[in-house]
Amino acid sequence: MFNNLKISVAGIRGIYPEDLSPEIAYKFGLSYGNFLKEKNIYVGRDTRISGEVLKYSLISSLIATGKNVIDLDIAPTPLVEFAVEKSKNVGGVIITASHNPFQYNGIKFLSKKGTFLNDREGDKLIELYRKGDFKLSKTPGKIFQDNQIKNRYFEEIYRNVEIEKIKKCNFKVVVDVCQGVGALYTKDFLTGLNCNIEILNEKPYGVFFHDPEPKKETLKQLSKYIEEKKVDIGFAQDPDGDRLAIVDEKGNIVGEELVIAICIKNILEKIKTPIVVNLSTSMVVDYIAKIYGVKVYRTKIGEVNVIEKMKKVKALVGGEGNGGVIYPLVHYGRDSFVAMSLILEYMARKEKKLSEIVSEFPSYFMKKEKYEIEVAKIKKIIEKIKKRYKKEKIDFTDGIKIIKKDGWIHIRPSGTEPVLRLVVESVDKKISDKYLDEIRELISLYL
């Protein structure tokens, strides 16, 4: 029924139009309209070329179920989450494939809390889709705009950082927005922090100059640009604006893992709070937690899993090591705009360059790989790895995480792509390479 459409707590995702067609968007809109009790629905999208047609298909089905739609058009995922969380009687939908290549698109569904649907809620939505017994309203809903939400969102972030300290620094910032939503939002946001801004890869919208995932391999253009300019920091956002990576003032690629580390350290210097991150986040978080005497909780991959645990333990900071920072004082959701403001705030408070801040963290060696493998073979690989490491300490919360004294290995099926993800980390590069070789050898038997 779903062809190669990928379904997870992060929503649905696939190649347009083979997997994710306007018809499927329409039917999922009917499903969500029947699922959601609330009357009003915020709808946003990233800049992908396929986003407009999917948006109109989705809106058409939503108003057919009697829902009113607040059409935000191109908008960051965190802004839509914020809009839902801070409003009453609303839900939310974002049309985006996040960090995936341009030929992909997807639909993320929010609960009335402004967070992605959890497993229970997602299963209910899928069940409605499968049954196909949709109830239409005799009185269709209406379509509205909200021209104030952008300013409300920015102002909420500004209120929760020491904005005057940031403004006094007059930071020079370069941002690679990779033709994503940042092309329409980031300059205005950083101008509000009194930054001097240069934008890379601004247009044409939705036609990504490079792999849109903000990771070390995709930051070379930004790094080279900074080497030739005198700037304070380089930022790289993913297409829907919920993830961030950084480059220091010398052009050194810091990447995405230290984004959450810097933000956590900044917050812990001001308030003591538990930390919640996912299983694949760097050990640097544990290092920071030990310094400040706070506890680290780890969850399954998926933003909603981190958020639900944060609410349970009353954590004021959390996120994922892929550059996704969650700061509940603004809203419960990964947010690159929040991350940028917290990093600039920390630089301003400490009166240090980014390279100096980074040098204070211990070095860990993380490597990430992914393999396109059939689902049936993935199950066999997991079983093989389970037998191989049966005498080790293993966490089965999400796939298999093998925990060692000097590092860890995490293998899991992706929730957003038809791939097997492998992440290893240790205190030594040679050890990380050794872990990689061990798993590669097992995986190679099934390639």
Image: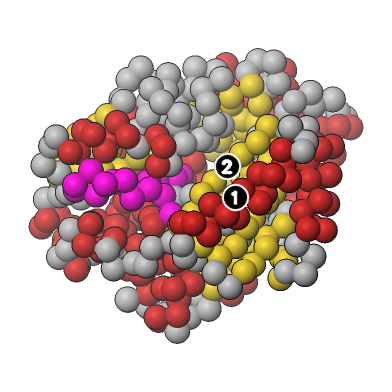
User: Residue 319: x and y, percent?
Assistant: 50, 58
Q: Earlier in the sequence, mark 2 or mark 1?
A: 2
Q: Hey, what amino acid is under mark 2?
A: Glu
Quadrant for residue 178, please give it: top left
Answer whether residue 303 is visible to the viewer in this image: no
Answer whether residue 375 is visible to the viewer in this image: yes
User: Residue 165: x and y, percent?
Assistant: 16, 62
Secondary structure under badge 1?
helix
Q: Is residue 279 left or right of residue 125?
A: left
- Residue 249 is a magenta residue: yes
Is disc 2 surrounded by few (<14), some (14 to 19) or many (20+) residues within 10 Å?
few
User: Residue 277: x and y, percent?
Assistant: 54, 63
Classify the position of the C terminus by image quarter.
top right
Give the residue displayed 29% in from the left and 57% down from the top. Answer: 343
Q: Which residue is mark 2?
A: 369
Q: Is residue 332 left or right of residue 359?
A: right
Q: Hey, what amino acid is under mark 1?
A: Leu
Judge whether 40 appears above or below 184 on screen.
Answer: below
Q: Is residue 232 left or right of residue 69?
A: left
Quadrant for residue 123, please give it: top right
Q: Range of the magenta residues?
A: 239-257
- Residue 235 is a magenta residue: no
Give the residue displayed 78% in from the left and 32% down from the top. Answer: 374
Q: Residue furthest bottom?
A: 293
Classify the position of the N terminus by image quarter.
top right
Q: Which residue is mark 1?
A: 436
Q: Nearer the viewer, mark 2 or mark 1?
A: 1
User: Residue 339: x and y, percent?
Assistant: 36, 53
